[in-house]
Image: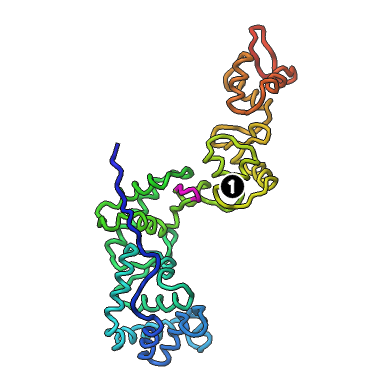
């Protein structure tokens, strides 16, 4: 058995403690940009009194110029900011920002990074601007596989992207794996990455870059297309609750478990209705529901008896009882009443039963 990789338990910062004032730095940088370009940058990055960031099209429409011309002016404004005296004097401040990104993992989702740098939208807009102006920060656009992200080390970024893609390929289509197992697999795919990054918090942060890998509220991981990962309503929470229990549950117990496991309020009647509608669940007794994936099939007791006899051939009464009770939580008498109905089943001379054609 392979030895488990030991993960670091150190705590990484959840919020930046940068020494500089972003308001002052952005204001000084913009002051050294020509007026027309400054106006475009303010609108593009939401650096004025209005926080929404404007598109190239909206700025161009308002100014009576093309989208491409706005892009050119924006580019010229950024270059002017980078060539300014303020920018060169702020080299240590940008280095401080770079070290913060390294501490967060070297490659970080845009949402997470901005959230560690500012608590309000205006602050996030300022840091987004500083990241774009800075020469050591690189932004990767959002794709079908990954969320928008920033990095300061191209080698780490490439290794993480490749490892996430390989990790995805190891995951089953629908099933999930415990978090500890997934992290061990991820570390295996990250061979060559500096040990300093083998920290559980950073590994989870890297996992959050992927659109295709996700976790459910029970800290189980899998493909985001899996019904075990998606949790959009009572049905999905019920599925996880029954799966966690590993045995059939009464619908009232399912509703209670949803509240205890996920802190979601689920009315008993609503839960029952959702279980009835979803093919992932099958009624196996009075109010008892199991998962279809466990091998249970829908239908009344009579249907189960017929299925057993058609599958296994003629059976004695005792064998029928045993096999039906593997598929349904019902009393012996309920099975026998159905089995002895001559309209559906026939008792042969040797005492075995067969379905009526």
What residue sits right under mark 1 in the picture? Answer: 258
**SS category of the residue bearing label 1:** helix
Residue range highlighted in magenta: 216-220
Furthest residue in direction top, as rendered = 349
Q: In this view of the protein, can residue 64 be seen by the observer?
A: yes
Question: What kind of colouring is applied to the model shown?
Answer: rainbow
In-front residue for pair 125/355: 125
Q: Position of residue 103 (x, y in %)?
A: 31, 65
> Quadrant location of residue 288?
top right
Check the image and report above or below for 118 versus 3. Answer: below
- With 68 as the anchor, is 282 left or right in this view? right
> Quadrant location of residue 124?
bottom left
In-front residue for pair 49/81: 49
Furthest residue in direction bottom, as rendered = 35
Q: Main secondary structure of the magenta part?
A: loop
Q: Position of residue 333 (x, y in %)?
A: 70, 20
Going 64% across and 43% down the picture, which residue do you hit?
275
- With 103 as the anchor, is 208 left or right in this view? right
């Amino acid at each position: 058995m392979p030895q488990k990789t030991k993960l670091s338990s150190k705590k990484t910062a959840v919020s930046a403690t940068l020494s500089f004032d972003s308001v002052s730095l952005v204001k000084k940088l913009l002051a050294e940009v020509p007026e027309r370009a400054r106006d475009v940058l303010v609108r593009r990055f939401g650096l004025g009194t209005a926080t929404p960031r404007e598109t190239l099209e909206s700025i161009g429409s308002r100014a009576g110029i093309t989208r491409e011309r706005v892009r050119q002016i924006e580019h010229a404004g950024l270059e002017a900011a980078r060539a300014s005296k303020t920018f060169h004097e702020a080299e240590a401040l940008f280095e401080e920002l770079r070290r913060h990104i390294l501490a967060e993992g070297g490659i970080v989702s845009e949402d997470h990074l901005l959230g560690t740098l500012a608590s309000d939208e205006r602050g996030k807009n300022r840091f987004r601007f500083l990241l774009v102006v800075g020469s050591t920060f690189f932004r990767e656009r959002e794709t079908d596989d990954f969320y928008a992200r920033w990095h300061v080390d191209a080698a780490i970024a490439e290794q993480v992207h490749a490892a996430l893609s390989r990790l995805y390929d190891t995951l089953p289509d629908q099933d999930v794996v415990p978090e500890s197992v997934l992290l061990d697999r991820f570390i295996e795919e990250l061979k060559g990455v500096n040990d300093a990054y083998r920290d559980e918090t950073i590994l989870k942060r890297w996992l959050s870059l992927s659109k295709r890998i996700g976790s459910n509220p029970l800290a189980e991981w899998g493909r985001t297309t899996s019904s075990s990962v998606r949790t959009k309503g009572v049905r999905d929470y019920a599925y996880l609750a029954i799966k966690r229990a590993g045995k059939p549950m009464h619908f009232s117990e399912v509703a209670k478990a949803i509240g205890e496991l996920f802190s979601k309020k689920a009315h008993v009647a609503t839960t029952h209705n959702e279980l009835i509608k979803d093919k992932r669940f099958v009624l196996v007794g009075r109010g008892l529901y199991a998962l279809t994936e466990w091998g249970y099939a829908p239908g009344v007791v009579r249907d189960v008896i017929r299925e057993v006899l058609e599958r296994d051939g003629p059976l004695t009464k005792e064998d029928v009882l045993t096999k039906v009770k593997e598929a349904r939580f019902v009393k012996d008498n309920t099975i026998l009443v159905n089995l002895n109905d001559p309209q559906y089943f026939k008792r042969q001379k040797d005492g075995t039963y067969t379905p009526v054609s």
